[in-house]
Structures are given as structure tokens and as C-alpha cells.
Amino acid sequence: MIALRKLGSRWTLLVLRELLGGRRRFSELRKAIPQVPAKSLARVLAKLEKDGLVQRTVNSMRPPQVSYSLVHNDPILRQVIDALFRYGSE
């Protein structure tokens, strides 16, 4: 049940799948998942950060840039997400 609560919201798996590829900026996530409204993407990222799955990093450049990455690039999480996407495409 805990896994479903953390991963079960509408856009969460798409966001996590993108972050499995490495650190991404908000704009890169928007381009990679264009069907996700900006507000929803921000909400998902905030929830994933609160749940301890995603780390938000603010670079001290001018203007500041924010990027997101997985806290732990866990092979089990990767296997679960890959299996769900394979199942969905069959």
C-alpha cells in the first residue's frame, strides 16, 4: 500500500521514469512529458521531494536554475517502473 501511495498518482511514474535517466531541469521534464500540465508537474515534483524520492537542487547561477534528481537510483525502482511500462504497452 505504501508503494501505491507514493507511486500511484496520475503523473508520478512518467516523472520518475524521466528522472531514472539522470538529473533534469523543470523545462526538460516539461519537454519530455508534454501532456503533463506545468502545475501538475510542479505538484508531483513537490510531493516526490516531500516523500524523499526526489532531490531538488538550486544552482547559484544567474538566473538560478533548479534541477531534480532521484535521491537513490535504486535498481529495484527501475525494475518496477520498467515492468509497469512494459505491461502497459502489451
Image (cartoon, rainbow, N blue to C red):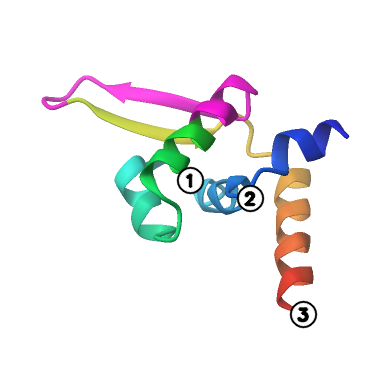
Give the position of the C terminus as an image quadrant.
Answer: bottom right
The label shown at residue 22 is 1
The x and y percentages for residue 48 are 58, 30
Mark found first going from the N terminus, 3 or 1? 1
- C-alpha gap between disc 1 and disc 2: 15 Å
Locate residue 15 relative to residue 57 in the image: left or right.
right
Q: Mark 2 points at which residue?
A: 13
Name which residue type carries label 2.
Answer: Leu
Mark found first going from the N terminus, 1 or 2? 2
Is 53 magenta? The answer is yes
The x and y percentages for residue 22 are 48, 45
Is 61 magenta? The answer is yes
The label shown at residue 90 is 3
Residue lying at 44% horizontally and 25% vertically, measured from the top left:
56
Q: Quadrant of residue 3?
A: top right
Residue lying at 78% horizontally and 52% vertically, measured from the top left:
80
Magenta region, residue range: 46-63
